Image (cartoon, helix red, strand yellow):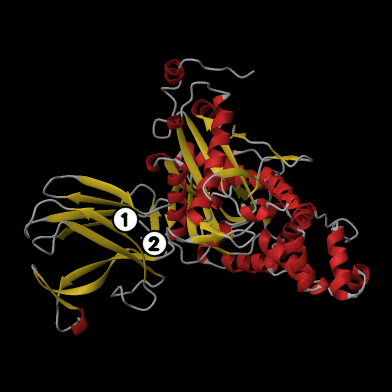
Amino acid sequence: MAFIWKSLDSFRRLFQQAEKSDNCLLVAAIDFGTTYSGWGFSFNHDFQTDPTHISTMNWSDGKTISQKGPTCILIKPDGKTIDTFGFEAEKRYSELIEKGEHTKWFYFHRFKMMLWNKPINKDTMLDDECGKSLPALTVFALSIRYMMDALFKEAKTRVDVLNEKDIYWVLTVPAIWNDSAKHFMRLAAHEAGIEKEKLTIALEPEVASILCRHAKLHNEGIGGISALQLGKKYLVVDAGGGTIDMTVHEVCFGGALKELHKATGGPWGGTMVDKAFLDFIAELIGKDALNGLKDQHKEDYIDLISEFEITKRNRNLQSDGRVTIRIPQAMVELVNHFKRQPLQNIIQNSCHAKTESIDKIVEHVSELLKTPEAKGVDTILMVGGFSESTLLQDAMRKGFHTLKIIVPSDAGLAVLKGAVMFGQRRTFIKERVSKFTYGINITTPFDEKKHPVDKRKELDIGVRCADIFEVMVKAGQRLVVGEKQYTQEMRIGDKKQSHVCFRIYTTEKTDVKFVTDAGCTQIGSVILPVSGSGLNRSIVVRALFGGTEIMVEIEDKSTGCITRTYIDCLS
């Protein structure tokens, strides 16, 4: 029986001894996936009793119930107001298609991958299913807001006096995303109404690993992930709908984890299989027939994709090898029109296409296992929705038959539930590995013997060499969470200078000299005011790279004022 608290003061007093995330009563996580999304939460007292006790939403398409819904959003014709999200968005959009009214609305489906490995900024636009554009920030923010509202409504049924300010939020992202994509998600969350101080960005393979370390998985057997002893290593494969994240973890004291190898992977998730399926259909029936199905019979096209998604997840390798997928009648008619022959004849005379997705995953795991950091790994943990595919599981077991392969029964929920646990206790992760060499653009006294003439610059404090790459951390460097990896006192260069601007650069090299060297890329900047005037001024710059985002701290020595901020990676 649920107990409804009518007094917020009594509720707070009850848990005043419990560990809280920034003095919040509840931790909520949003797993924003490429194919499916969901949310979950836990109150602090529940976490203290059982860290894995996490409430999630039940989504329904009218036939089945699941704990995640499709990542699709329907936005009203004004381009600013959400109509609905998930299964309801699919249903409502199909109804609009039947009425011929869909072209005025905005329908976005599986749009998360637009953040993968592409230049993005605050004004990046996103095309919907009909080719109409809206700001990507608006689409992501409205999606997040929908899940926030649904979560808050459910949490209020447990604690009637709960306020949104009592919630600490966690938003998941792939570990292989760049800093710009992570910052974009932070901005979208802020636009959705989450205060920046009450938000943590979580890395998907990390949080999934956290859950599996602390949950007793009924199918992991003796010596599974939760039973690994101090110092043991295992490889994590987070196979999602869009990306595949891989890393190596080591068990630390108290159940905490440290990353031994930087996160790697690629866009080989379940949607790559979907693309191969559509390519196969296009080759089978012709691009004209497929485009006709998508443009003239959108409802049937959506049903075809949904049918394939279900089949892909439920594929049983122990059967006789046949796969049954229902074909829309409209597709049969279009094939007859364009091909002038029955669809059945075309299928019987075709060659079956082969997807690269599983081959890419197995190949990458094989390479990762050869690294020094992976020496001694005897277990592979598979999480994420695509890990539920028996095709992928079978390929992994065949490719790595000497290793123990563990797939949780709820692999698709591991990221979501782990994110809630991470929000409750961010010390679960002790150490990470830097993917890049990070540095800032500074000046140093000009030396004619070693500095190029074109770098010579005259400032109030003297002749300086510009564009020096001041290394803050190096690629492959171990980063202890919570520790400052860089501290440097710097003089103000000009008498009338009122602000300092630090431009942050990355490179995969470790011996870079100038920010203009090949391979160096500016990823963001930090601009902060400084007090006073003259040359007898200085600041202390400190940076923390061990978190999921880069935090910079700048102290004005003349006033003692300290400002902390995340790097703006979209400036």
Q: Does any portion of residue 211 appear in the rendered image? A: no
Q: Which residue is mark 1?
A: 485
Residue 506, how many percent across, how many down? Answer: 37, 67
Identify the secondary structure beneath mark 2.
loop
Q: Does any portion of residue 279 appear in the rendered image? A: yes
Disc number placed over residue 407 in the picture, else none: none
Question: Is 13 in front, or is 69?
Answer: 69
What residue lies at 49% left-to-right and 21% top-to-bottom?
161
470 left or right, relative to 418: left
335 left or right, relative to 431: right
Residue 47, how many percent across, how many down? Answer: 53, 30
Identify the secondary structure beneath mark 1.
loop
421 left or right, relative to 533: right
Q: Amino acid at mark 1?
A: Gln
Q: Is residue 100 above or below residue 355?
A: above
Q: Residues within 10 Å of mark 2 (few under 14, many from 20)?
A: some
Question: Is 183 in front, or is 412?
Answer: 183
Question: Is 234 in front, or is 328?
Answer: 328
Q: Which residue is mark 2?
A: 477
- Give how far apart the Cα atoms at labels 2 and 1 are: 10 Å
Q: Is residue 508 above or below residue 262?
A: below
Question: Is 146 in front, or is 234?
Answer: 146
Residue 535, how many percent across, how many down? Answer: 7, 60
504 left or right, relative to 393: left
Q: Are marks 2 and 1 in contact (CB under 8 Å)?
A: yes
